[in-house]
Image (cartoon, grey):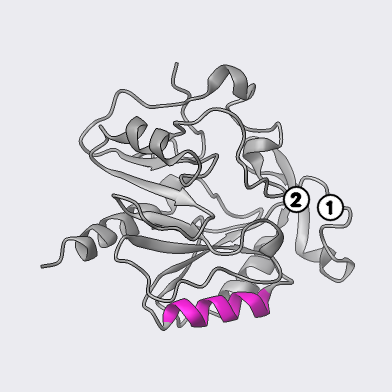
Amino acid sequence: MYKENPKTKGSGILCAIPQTGTCPNKCEDCFFQSGRSYLEPLQNNLPNMPEDILGYHVVRVNDGNDSNNDKDTVFCGTAGYLHKFYNTAIPNLDFDAPVVLTANPGKMTDSDFHKIDCPPDNLMFVRFRANTWNTELQRQCIRYYCQKEIPIVLTFMAYFNAVNKIPKAYEDDYVFRKRTLNSYYAITTKAWHAVMKMYEDNKWVYSCGKIEGEKGDTHCRFCGNCLREYFAALVKMNKE
């Protein structure tokens, strides 16, 4: 039976995972394979595929796992969805619908990012895993993709275990609090504002979630980034 992602509830977005098992990327602090996913136990709830699709629903493919993993299964499992977009952390964007690329997955988070020299029209946006100590890498990534007119969405990292994850100089930027289902060391609203202020005049940069931190709410219904950029990507893909 399909389990709805509580983060996307009420947003018009449904989530699909066509594969079984965990993601081969094994990014640290990923909720999907940490034992804290809304789909636990994974062996009982995967694949997780919505069936009651209405005309206005957009399906987010792989809110867990990676759409480049077992691609034949991904394509076959989602073939019947009219509106869908894929998620991947692997810089292979050969998909039949819009796709979101995580630019700095896993061990790249604070050190490097995937650079797509000639972004295809189906690249919806680049997702950057942000924190308060990788701001120089943020700026490099934003500069790179802004020149190519690709939107960048900053997804602010949360850490289940802060030991050896949050540098001591940045501890005051984080507070242990509940997000959607679980509690993490997550960015404060004050620190979030400080990061976003750097980009307030940049039309290509957005935050994942309306407002981050203890004063905000990161449920998708208050955000709209994915819906806006999904339809913008369709326009690009079908321009003739």
| Residue at image point 48% right, 38% down | 70
Disc assigned to residue 154: none
Q: Is residue 29 left or right of residue 67?
A: right
User: Residue 63 location in percent, x, y?
Assistant: 50, 41
Of residues 55 and 97, the one nearer the viewer is: 97
Q: Does residue 210 lie above or below 146 as drawn?
A: above
Secondary structure that dominates the magenta span: helix
| Residue 233 placement: quadrant | bottom left
Q: Quadrant of the C terminus?
A: bottom left
Q: Amino acid at mark 2?
A: Tyr
Q: Amino acid at mark 1?
A: Ala
Q: Is residue 149 left or right of residue 22?
A: left
Q: Visible in this render: residue 14? A: no
Q: Is residue 236 left or right of residue 175?
A: left
User: Residue 130 location in percent, x, y?
Assistant: 63, 64
Q: Does residue 159 lie above or below 123 as drawn?
A: above
User: Residue 228 location in percent, x, y?
Assistant: 32, 58
* Residue bearing mark 1: 162
Q: CA distance from mark 2 to mark 1?
A: 6 Å
* Helix, strand or loop for disc 2: loop
Is residue 58 highlighted in magenta? no
Q: Visible in this render: residue 227? A: yes
User: Residue 158 location in percent, x, y?
Assistant: 70, 52
Of residues 61 and 92, the one nearer the viewer is: 92
| Residue 12 placement: quadrant | top left
Q: Is residue 51 left or right of residue 6?
A: left
* Residue bearing mark 2: 159
Of residues 1 and 11, the one nearer the viewer is: 1
Q: Quadrant of the N terminus?
A: top left
Q: Are marks 2 and 1 in contact (CB under 8 Å)?
A: yes
Q: Which residues are magenta?
A: 135-146
